[in-house]
Amino acid sequence: MKGRLLILAGLLAAAVLAYWGAQWYFAHRHPPPPPPAADPLAWMETELQIDGATLAKVRALHDSYQPVCGTMCMQIAEANARVRSLLEQSRAMTPELEQALREAQLRQADCRTAMLRHIYETAALLPPDAGGRYLKIVTARLVEDGLCLSDVTEKKP
């Protein structure tokens, strides 16, 4: 009887050790991903090697543009909703649908133009080398369809 208890205790101890060993191994082998950056423009400081004062100017310009960007995004969403509504009602191209499509394209073009203007204003705040690198990074992403300002400037490609 004593032998069986000793074997059972040994098996239990081995199971506990195996469990904790596996926990430690997987916790250290696959650490959790880092949390997202609190400052979406922080990449500019390290990637473009700009100082805190310059980054503060960029941040102020970025923050002042956000309401403009938000308004334009709402206008694009409304124009797209109008197109969707007309598509649901129609089985053929109508003058109304054609006009709605043109309006949606115009809203997107206005947005991209304003965004590019903002990007150039931002680049002008940076030292020449950093401004050139910034333009290369963000304009490469701007040519992709459907990007919003936050997609272009807040995430390093």
Image (tube, helix red, strand yellow):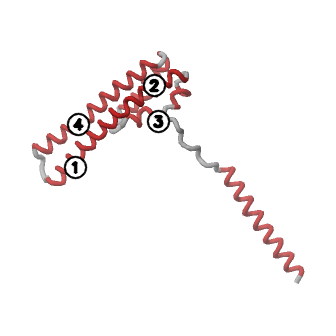
Measured Cα–Cα span from mark 3 to mark 1: 30 Å
Residue beneath the point at 24% across and 35% down: 107
Q: Position of residue 11 (x, y in %)?
A: 80, 72
Q: List x then y, in percent, for residue 146.
A: 33, 39
Label 2–label 4 contact, CB within 8 A:
no
Local secondary structure at mark 2? helix
> Is label 3 in a helix, a strand or a loop?
loop
Q: Residues within 10 Å of mark 2 (few under 14, many from 20)?
A: many
Single out the residue that lies furthest toward the left. 95
Which residue is farthest bottom? 1
Distance (Cα) linking label 2 and label 1? 37 Å
Question: Looking at numbered disc 4 in the image, what kind of residue is underneath it?
Answer: Gln
Residue bearing the label numbered 4:
105
Of 68 and 116, nearer the camera is: 68
- The correct choice, above or below, for 75 with respect to 1 in the image is above
* Distance of label 4 from label 1 (alpha carbons): 14 Å
Look at mark 3 in the image and give the residue it sits on. Answer: 155
**Which numbered disc, 2 or 1, marks the residue that appears first in the sequence?**
2
Q: Secondary structure at mark 1?
A: helix
Q: Tell me what residue is drawn at x 12 percent, y 44 percent.
A: 96
Residue identifier under label 2? 58
Q: Which is nearer the N-term, disc 4 or disc 1?
A: 1
Residue 98 lies, with reference to residue 8, above or below; the image says: above
Asked if the residues shown at circle 3 and circle 1 are in contact, with their CB atoms under 8 angstroms apart, the answer is no
What is the C-alpha distance between the residues marked 2 and 3? 15 Å
Q: Nearer the viewer, mark 2 or mark 4?
A: 2
Q: Earlier in the sequence, mark 3 or mark 4?
A: 4
Mark 2 or 3: the one toward you: 2
Q: In the image, what residue type sits under mark 1?
A: Arg
Q: Is residue 57 left or right of residue 10?
A: left
